[in-house]
Image (cartoon, rainbow, N blue to C red):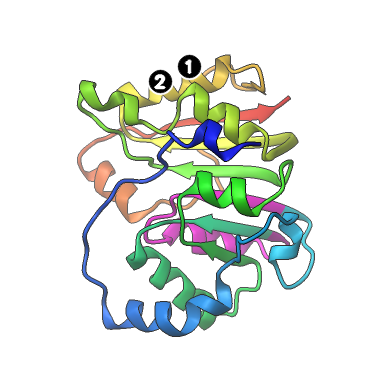
């Protein structure tokens, strides 16, 4: 997989936020303990202290509420979270340390760079993308993550019969996600349309805010052929 082929794909949006003292301490002292070195390509199992039954990737974990909950409640599965914004990374590595989670590791980098430079393909049993930036203005739709070129890329990192699970509260984007994922030749949609909410996925703070504003949640869950 050549990185240059997908160098135009952006998996994040620049945001300027101020770190709390706890987040700064976690980044300075704990990040080296729970982050992943991507200086060379390796099998995903080498990124964790011991082997696990399954390996799941989350792209853009934000402040990590869902990430931490899922990892804590599924100790037999290893979770690799990728996020570029330091606030969320600091919070998550601090929580990994506090909770003693040996099944959760993080990468602070764009997902395209992290995967193409640091992880061998056919690595993951599942990929989570919860509430990606919707880029609501029509002229910005081309910046949305879930498009054919990104699916071409991420499909190579999902094992056969592994899953891609995308959640959004923007109906326009939800329709695009459903169409792109369901029509991609690497995936099939077992639901035929939007999926029901997966019971193991917790409700995030962002999602709770959406509920208060009566925003429906749209879920797409497809399987790698």
For label 1, the crowd category at 10 Å Cα-Cα, with few meaning under 14, some 14 to 19 and many 20 or more, is some
What residue did someone put label 1 on?
179
Tags 2 and 1 in contact by the CB under 8 Å rule? yes
The x and y percentages for residue 39 are 61, 61
Whole-percent x, y for residue 18 in the image: 21, 69
The image quadrant that residue 21 belongs to is bottom left
Q: Residue at x 37, y 84 (%)?
A: 25
Compared with residue 210, is residue 193 higher up or lower down, i.e. above or below?
above
> In the image, 69: left or right of 37?
left
Q: Which mark identifies residue 73?
A: none
Q: Magenta span covers which residues?
A: 55-77
Residue at mark 2 to residue at mark 1: CA–CA distance: 5 Å
At mark 1, the secondary structure is helix
Badge 2 is on which residue? 176
From the viewer's side, name the closer residue of 38 and 107: 38
Who is closer to the viewer here, 113 or 175? Answer: 113
- Looking at the image, the residue that sits furthest to the front is 4
Q: Nearer the viewer, residue 41 or 92?
A: 41
**Quadrant into which the N terminus falls:** top right
Q: Residue at x 43, y 50 (%)?
A: 60
Q: Is residue 1 visible to us here?
A: yes
- Whether residue 196 is visible here, answered yes or no, is no
Secondary element under disc 2, as helix, strand or loop, is: helix
Q: Quadrant of residue 224?
A: top right
- Foreground of the two, 26 or 36: 36
Residue shown at 50% from the left, 58% from the top: 67
């Amino acid at each position: 997989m050549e990185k240059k082929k997908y160098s135009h794909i952006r998996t994040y949006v620049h945001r300027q936020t101020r770190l709390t003292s706890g987040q700064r301490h976690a980044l300075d002292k704990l990040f080296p303990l729970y982050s992943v070195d991507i200086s060379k390509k390796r099998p995903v199992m080498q990124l964790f202290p011991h082997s696990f039954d399954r390996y799941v990737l989350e792209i853009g974990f934000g402040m990590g509420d869902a990430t931490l909950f899922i990892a804590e409640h599924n100790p037999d599965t290893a979770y690799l979270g990728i996020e570029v914004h330091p606030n969320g990374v600091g919070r998550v590595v601090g929580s990994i340390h506090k909770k003693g989670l040996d099944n959760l590791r993080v990468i602070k980098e764009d997902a395209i760079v992290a995967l193409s430079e640091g992880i061998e393909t056919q690595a993951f049993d599942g990929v989570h993308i919860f509430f990606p930036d919707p880029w609501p203005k029509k002229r910005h739709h081309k910046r949305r993550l879930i498009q054919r070129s990104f699916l071409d890329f991420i499909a190579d990192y999902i094992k056969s019969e592994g899953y891609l699970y995308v959640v959004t509260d923007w109906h326009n984007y939800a329709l695009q996600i459903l169409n792109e994922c369901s029509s991609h030749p690497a995936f099939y949609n077992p639901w035929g349309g939007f999926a029901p909410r997966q019971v193991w996925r917790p409700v995030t703070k962002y999602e709770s805010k959406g509920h208060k504003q009566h925003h429906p949640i749209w879920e797409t869950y497809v399987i790698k052929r």
